[in-house]
Image (spheres, helix red, strand yellow):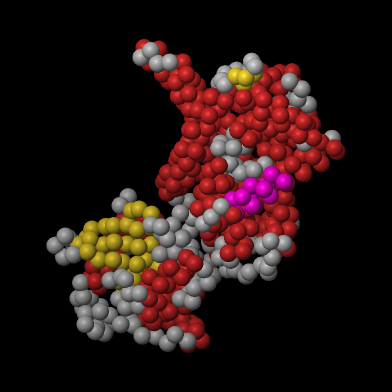
Amino acid sequence: MEDGSYTIALVGNPNTGKSTVFNALTGLKQHTGNWTGKTVGNAVGVYEYKNSRFDIVDLPGIYSTNPSSPDEKEAIDFLRNNKTDSVVIVADATCLERNLILILQICSICENVILCVNLLDEAKRKNITIDTVKLSQELNIDVVGTNARDKKGLEKLKDVIYKNVIKTEFNCKSLKNGRRENKYSSNIDHIVFDAEKIYKMAVKTDCCQACCVDRRIDNIVLSKRFGIPLMLAMLGLILWITIFGANYPSEMLSSFFSIVEVKLTEFFQFMNISKFWYGVFVEGIFRTLSWIVAVMLPPMAIFFPLFTFLEDLGLLPRIAFNLDRFFKNAKTHGKQVLTMCMGLGCNAAGVTACRIIDSPRERLIAIITNNFVPCNGRFPGIIAISSIFMAGTGVFASLRVALIVLAAIVFSVFITLIVSRILSATILKGLPSSFVLELPPYRKPQIKKIIVRSLVDRTLFVLGRAVVVAAPIGAVIWIMQNTFIDGNSVLFYMADFLDPFAKIIGLDGFILTAFIIGMPANEIVIPLIIMFYMRNSALIPFDNLSELGDLLISNGWTLKTAVCSILFSLNHFPCSTTLLTIRKETGGMKWPVVTFLIHTAVGVFICFAANIIL
């Protein structure tokens, strides 16, 4: 570049649209760093303006310059170490008075500060008028108003950043060696006083219909009477859409992979490759991966966009608000609700999301208990079993299945609270920490952003990780099923050995073996059970629920077996992907082992109790 390269820090309170500004500035020219942040780390992006390169560092959201969490400390250290050519503070135009406290704090420790007042469209909707000229005069910094969603004001922001970093006298009141200085008292009382004074001088507000509408919605959504029932109804609707919306694309993918398998078979025959290697690669690895993709991809492609839609709309923090008192009673953190919601898509993603919890003790509790929430890999088995043994037939069968799955999730939340309370009183003893739970205004979801975030950042990321873990197990399953001793396979002997114990918890040896062998990927548990019962040499899918039901019943399944299988699916040990993620998040093998033992013990105890009661 002719004029050089500059580093710009993007900072602000959470829920100010900072990430939207970042995405609008950098487009696709961005990557994820290795800092702790929201759920996947810190983002760094690049844009070019007037022959100059600008590296934008999207720092984690902070409330003050006195850090209370690891990610806030990373952000403050970055600012204090003066690693930037300019600092852009993104503020929410609808609650500027609170944002001004952080703005004044950053101005007291940083030079070359620019204020980006974002969400001007929402401020206009709420009859809030901001005098950016007056604000600039009072703060002694450049102020730019933006509506990043519609990309309004971004060109002016780029121009202000450019003129700021090349040390021109664009609207500057004081310069020192070409860099602007803004000195404010670091005393919090003085800062609060200054924030109130500046806000009154630069902002005019009138009561508006939009504010009243938001309050009226919250009076219902956050009420003790309607809050939780509405939350359950919303979750039930999402589950119904996910479960039955995934049927057709799953069938299409299965048909596609069947065609591919035929072509692979022809290729192996043409190349005269031995039956052993054909079995390992086609009937083992390929069939396992194709089953996982066909079963896992469609539900995730539906669930994650719906989840992100709620997140963009502003409902997820309100779900955390409604359930906070339950987690407080369990001596754990209210933000654990959000990590559990993510766990419904994938427990590994839910474990990673636990980074949003500041307290190390409460973060560990959330990590350990996240697997009690059923992920979308366990849904196919739960749905199939409940459809055969519990939902019956008729027009409302699909609705009954959705209600059964919803009941299973509610039960998993109940178990999570109990285990969290026990952990809080024993190996992770301590008092629950306080935290700030900000309820953002209801916002119009950004469909394009939802699709990109949910499909690329979540669906494909989780699916890719599951495929990598499950590929080797496909070969192992085939080898074990096709290695015979006295006429029976290794897996048969394993199932026969486990059968007495499995009967105690309401299962049989084949079911328990399927759960154990299916540890790398929960999606293959049902195909494994089918393979065992049919004495097949490889995994095979089922054509319809009626055929599957006949197969299960002919092998001794009853309603008790179905209930215990669902309970064990809800409470058994985490999959390999989740355990590897726990190891990465905790930095060792101790907590993955503890998590494995706790979940196994809980699953065995619940199934044992159900077997006795039923």
Vertical comparison of 80 with 242: above or below = below
Residue 588 on image: x %, y %: 53, 55
Q: Residue at x 14, y 62 (%)?
A: 2
Quadrant where the image shows the N terminus: bottom left
Main SS, magenta residues = helix
Q: Is residue 601 visible?
A: yes
Which residue is most to the right? 613
Vertical comparison of 441 with 265: above or below = below
Q: Residue at x 24, y 83 (%)?
A: 175
Quadrant where the image shows the C terminus: top right
Q: Residue at x 73, y 46 (%)?
A: 602
Residue 87 on image: x %, y %: 34, 71
Q: Is residue 118 visible?
A: no
Residue 596 within the segment the image draws in magenta: yes
Vertical comparison of 413 with 73: above or below = above
Residue 426 within the segment the image draws in magenta: no
Q: Which residues are magenta?
A: 591-601
Residue 44 on image: x %, y %: 35, 58
Residue 611 on image: x %, y %: 81, 36
* Quarter of the figure with residue 525: top right
Q: Which of these two is toward me, 278 or 210? A: 278
Q: Which of these two is toward me, 594 or 266? A: 594
